[in-house]
Image (cartoon, rainbow, N blue to C red):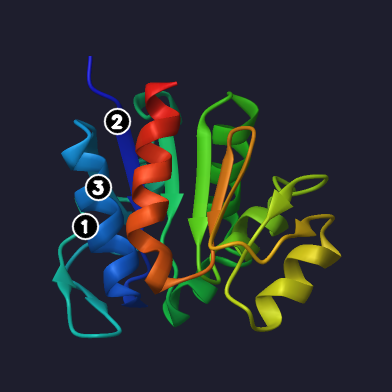
Amino acid sequence: MASKALLIIAPENFRDEELLHTKEELERAGAETTIASSKTGEARGMLGARVTPDIKLDQVKIDDYDVVVFVGGSGSAVYFNDKRAISIAREAFSKGKKVCAICIAPVILANAGVLKGKRATAFPDDSVSKIKSKGATYTGKPVEVDGNVITADGPASAREFGRTIAKALKG
């Protein structure tokens, strides 16, 4: 049976490559992907990509997915303290699912308590101090894997991030 991946994007200013390259690598490895956002209707990437999410965050059922991926870009900051986004991260982690984030989105995982005691990476801006303040050990690697948590530092690492998640899903 194919793995199922949930990719969560901001309604505005998600980072195009972090969604598109990650999704492409997951699909190339045979995973089924679903895109979720806080709003239905067209979401726009920072570089102009236009995507219509399949579902809204409040429709997400964690048990339907093997992995949850929070896509970065400046817009993902809307989820830093979003109750639904944080509960999705927490529930996925507590149920042993793969929980992943790229760019500034690891801050969502940090705020959900998922990065406490974990090695992680993030975009090299104030995201680093935010994840460290919640107990993460920042490594600065392009992609970091610690158990079921996979983080990446930004757009240049999106393909490697997607391949790393795909590999982790194959076990």
Mark 2 or mark 1: name the one nearer the start of the chain: 2
Q: Which residue is mark 2?
A: 4
Q: Nearer the viewer, residue 9 or 159?
A: 159
Q: Which residue is mark 3?
A: 25
State how far apart marks 2 and 1 are (Cα).
15 Å
Q: Which residue is mark 1?
A: 53
Q: Is residue 96 left or right of residue 21?
A: right
Q: Residues within 10 Å of mark 1 (few under 14, many from 20)?
A: many
User: In the rendered image, is residue 16 in sight?
Assistant: yes
Residue mark closest to the camera, 2 vs 1: 2
Mark 2 or mark 3: name the one nearer the start of the chain: 2
Mark 1: secondary structure: loop
Q: Residues within 10 Å of mark 2 (few under 14, many from 20)?
A: some
Q: Is residue 105 left or right of residue 39?
A: right
Q: Residue at x 39, y 72 (%)?
A: 155
Residue 152 in percent (x, y) is at: 52, 60
Q: Residue at x 52, y 29 (%)?
A: 97
Q: Residues within 10 Å of mark 3 (few under 14, many from 20)?
A: many
Residue 3 in percent (x, y) is at: 29, 26
User: In the rendered image, is residue 55 in sight?
Assistant: no
Mark 3 or mark 1: name the one nearer the start of the chain: 3
Q: Nearer the viewer, residue 17 or 56?
A: 17
Amino acid bearing label 2: Lys
Amino acid bearing label 3: Glu
Q: Is residue 142 above or below residue 161?
A: below
Amino acid bearing label 1: Pro
Residue 149 in percent (x, y) is at: 60, 41
**Residue 120 marker:** none
Q: Dividing the picture into quarters, in which one does residue 28 lie? A: top left
